[in-house]
Each structure stands twice: as C-alpha cells, then as structure tokens.
Image (spheres, helix red, strand yellow):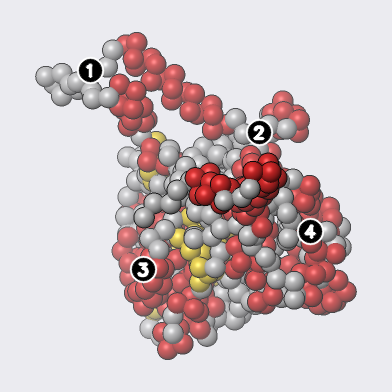
Amino acid sequence: MAHAPWSQRRRPSVRAVVMPAIPTLSFLCVLVLIMLVLFSLFAGFINLERLPHSSSLQNSLARNNVFPSNAVEDKSGLVPSGGHSRKNDLWVSSLSKFYYGCSSSSNKFSSVEANTRPNRYLLIATSGGLNQQRTGITDAVVAARILNATLVVPKLDQKSFWKDSSDFGEIFDVDWFISLLSNDVRIIKQLPMTGKKPVANPYSMRVPRKCTPRCYHNRVLPVLLKKHAVQLTKFDYRLANKLDSDLQKLRCRVNYHALRFTESISEMGRTVVQRMQEKNKQFIALHLRFEPDMLAFSGCYYGGGEKERRELGAIRKRWKTLHTRNPDKERRHGKCPLTPQEVGLMLRALGFGNDVHIYVASGEVYGGEDTLAPLKEFFPNFYSKERLLSKEELMPFSSFSSRMAALDYIVCDESNVFVTNNNGNMARMLAGRRRYFGHKRTIRPNARKLYSLFINRANMTWEAFASRVRTSQKGFMGEPNEVRPGRGEFHENPSTCICERSEAKKMAIFNQRLGKIGTSKSGKTNMSKGVEQEVDMQVADDEEEMSDLDYTDEDVTLREKGEYNGTNSDYDIFFKSDEPELEDILSD
C-alpha cells in the first residue's frame, strides 16, 4: 500500500489540537522534518568504512603521518563507503581493439639452415627467479642467432636466494620450445657426444649487461670459434635493449609463443583462474610486492617505528654494496612500494567499488594480516592461490618457488586488470605480455605524485582526493602509446611487435559518427573525401589526447631537452634507474 506524503500524514494530528497551539506545533513539525532530511543527507558520511586500529604497525604509521589517523574516521567522506565500480573504461581500454601483437619475421630473415654454423654451441646459465630467468631464456635464443650457433636448452638457476631445484623441462614445455623455434634457431637438449664425452668442454665466461650484437661478435665469437662450446653465466639482461626489427620480433616469438608452461602448471593455473571467474566474471590481480626483503632493499620507511628499523635493517645487511638512503627522499621520488592501504585507496579513488574481486599475488607480507587488513576492508572479496586451492592441490608446487610463481603469473596474465606495485621483473614481463596481447588493462601507481596526495588527503574531501588520483594516474593505466617506442626495457615495452589497425580505427570512428556505411559494387566503403579528412582529424585528436597527460614544469623542461618520452616524466623513474632490481641482487 502506498504511503501518503509527510504533509498529509501530519494533518490529522494538527487538527486535533486546540487552535492556540497550532503555530507552535507546526513549527515543531517543520523542525523535525528538517532534521530528518539533514540526517538522510549525511547518512552516507556516517556509514564509513572503519579501518582497524589494533595493529601497532598501523598505529605507528598514523603517528608518522604516513597514514594520517584522522583519515580513518574522517567525517568529510575522505574514506569511501561501499560503492560499485564505475563503468567508464575501468576494466578495458577503449583503444585496445586497434592494436595486436605481430612477431612474424620478414623475408630478409634467413633460414635456420643458412644461419647455423657447424661446431658452434652456446650454453646459457640463467640467473634469479622465474621472471628474471625468463628474460635470460628469451635473450639466449637471440644471442645464439647472432652468433650463428646451436643453442643448448638453458640451465635454470638452482642456487640463488629461491633455491628452486626445478630444471627447464619441469617449468616449461621443452619440446614445444624447440619445435616452435625450429625455423629460427637450432636448439638441442644437450651437447652431442663423441663416444662417452661431449664434443667439446664448454668455456665459461660472462658478457656485460646490455651487450650489443657487435659486443657478442667481439667478445664471444672468437672464443666460440676456438673452443666450439661457450657457456655464458649469470645470463640476465645481457642483450641490448635496441636491436634490429627481426631480432626484436624473434624475442617476441620466444617470450610470447615458445615459452609455454608445462601441462601440470598450466592446468593448475587455469583452475585458479576458473575459480576466480566463478566468483565474479571480472577480477583484478594485484602483485603486491610488500615482502620484508623488498621493503628492506627499497631503503624506505613505512612507519613501523624502532621495531621496523631493526628488522629491515638486519635484512639490509645481506647486501654489503647497498648504500644508505634517505627514506623521505626515496618516497618523494616515487621509489617506494605503496602500502596495502595506499593501494586500496588508489583503486577506490580510480572508481573500483568494494564489490570488486581481487586476487593477490604475494609472498610473505611484512606485518602479516594486520598490514593486509586495510586492503581487505576496502575489498572484502580478497583471494590468493592458497585460499582458492586445497593443500593437496598445492602440494606438487608449494616446495618450488618458480612453480608457485608460475601459477601467479598465469592468473595475473588472465586477469581483467593487472595492478603492479613495483617495477620488478614480474611486473615488466607481464606488462609487456599484456601489451602484446591486446593492451589488457595494466595499472602502475604513479608513486611520485600519489605520495603528496596520501600525505595531504586529510585536508581534502573524498571527491577532490579521487579526482586528483585519477589525474595523477593518466599515463599509468596501460593505454596504448603511453610510452614512446624504444623507451624502457624491451620486455616491458615490445613496441616493435605491436601493430595498429589504423583502418579499423578510422572505420570505428566513421561508424560512430555517421551510422551505417554504404558500399560500392566493388565492396569498398564509400567515404567522401570530406568525411575521410574529418575521421583522420579525429584519429589525430585521439592520439594527441593520449599524450595530453597533465604536464608539469619539469615535463616541459624535459621535452625542450629532447628527453620527454611521450607521457608523464614520472615514468622515466622506472626506465632510467641503473640500480639492479631486488631479484638481481638476490641471485648474486
């Protein structure tokens, strides 16, 4: 039954009162009505998500103004309450359909028979964890091609920090690897034997990082001609970033097509993806990177007081070559991973509601559940492989760090949105892969600009804070053309292997503007010259909009010097750093 409006519902009680009391009671009714309206207006601010205060680490963070404590219960609506994800291109880039991976070789690329010389065998010893080793395997194939040599299936690092005893065939499908690359490089599983001995005793040596083809010819080829078999040790990032087009495309064929996980790993990875999709069709995968080793290596301070300084300081002593850093300076320059709470704030500000399902790829998180609690408050639908798989299902993988990392790799790759909290090896490899396979949404925090927002967010309304976060993240959302071709590590930005469907883009804009397109007898689209020019202008406008990314004075200065990379200068922090990544150090 429909309810009568407030005014009608009040009239009977008013008529029942003697006449002198009417003005007083009317005034009271109006006052009550006003109070009810005000209460309803502010109800959204009263029902705030309350973040836990029990953790000593979080209390310390608040005291040190890393997480201002008044932001937790702020009555201005600084912390969002509930909400659903915004629909405007949060989950996918509207331009992604115009790009595709293209890694076929040109007609100038000679056959494997013509390129391979007899009695030249290249052996590779990779270094680091799974994704660092992946870079080494990819570049090893190209190095063998440069040296006109036969490649022996690379050895995986079994002695580094992770101490994973898996060999190549236990992680990757070795037969597929050899077969798919059979037209590019000759690959064998082991050195040929003459009687009971190998054809040659491999000579061990190491090449510099980012060694060019000329470098390989000058340093390795003379030894290879004399010894016939050379093993390159600690082989990670030992090939130049810039190579000719056919060699770059060979890199892509290796990384995105030939390196396929074994069936047991692939099947379990698909199981985790399927279980995430059963809970919700769309999900975010977050590579959190908030492990004790990562934090210690960063040299940053996360507000945990003397206990944190003592614990992380003890870990830092493992690396005698690390210099002392200024934690505040590192954070200002965007070189510190975001805390779990900061990641949650960023994602909510971008528009992801608390109904979003999140898969977290992470090792041991510093501070444990207390540290994760704020992120779980923002996103209650919080999962990991340990939560989605039983102990029995995980048993064949749990004792092998590379196999566990491979499961995370598969889920992160298949996620609708991938969020990385640090520019490590896994982040770079997945960013490149997701660009190659259609520019799937990949979000990287613009930590330099977000730093000041996190520090000052208690002085802003939630709407102002969210707006500034969205502005700061322009150029860090995985859009096509965010990074100029040739910038960054090739594994992260494989621009040579990404092609654009320019005509398809024009057709899409044309369809949008003019509706149904007429066709001629030949089947070609009828587009007047004036309309074609208009569409070309729209395409140009779209491309210009991609580079219009909240320029700062520093950006303009970089552009004038010719150092601007087509997006915010903040991105160069990741590309210009000569400091090794954590995995590089741990593998020494």
Instruction: Identify the residue position indicated by label 3 in the image.
Output: 278
Label 4 near label 3: C-beta < 8 Å? no
* Secondary structure category for the residue under label 2: loop
First-in-chain label (2 vs 1): 1
Q: Position of residue 358 (x, y in %)?
A: 51, 64
For the residues labelled 3 and 4, the Cα–Cα distance comes to 38 Å
- The three-letter code of the residue at mark 4 reads Asn
First-in-chain label (2 vs 4): 4
Residue farthest left in this picture: 521
> Crowdedness of circle 4 by 10 Å Cα count: few (<14), some, many (20+)?
some
For the residues labelled 1 and 3, the Cα–Cα distance comes to 45 Å
- The three-letter code of the residue at mark 1 reads Asn
For the residues labelled 1 and 4, the Cα–Cα distance comes to 62 Å
Position of the N terminus by quadrant:
bottom left
The mark found on residue 526 in the picture is 1
Label 4 near label 2: C-beta < 8 Å? no
For the residues labelled 2 and 1, the Cα–Cα distance comes to 39 Å
The mark found on residue 70 in the picture is 4
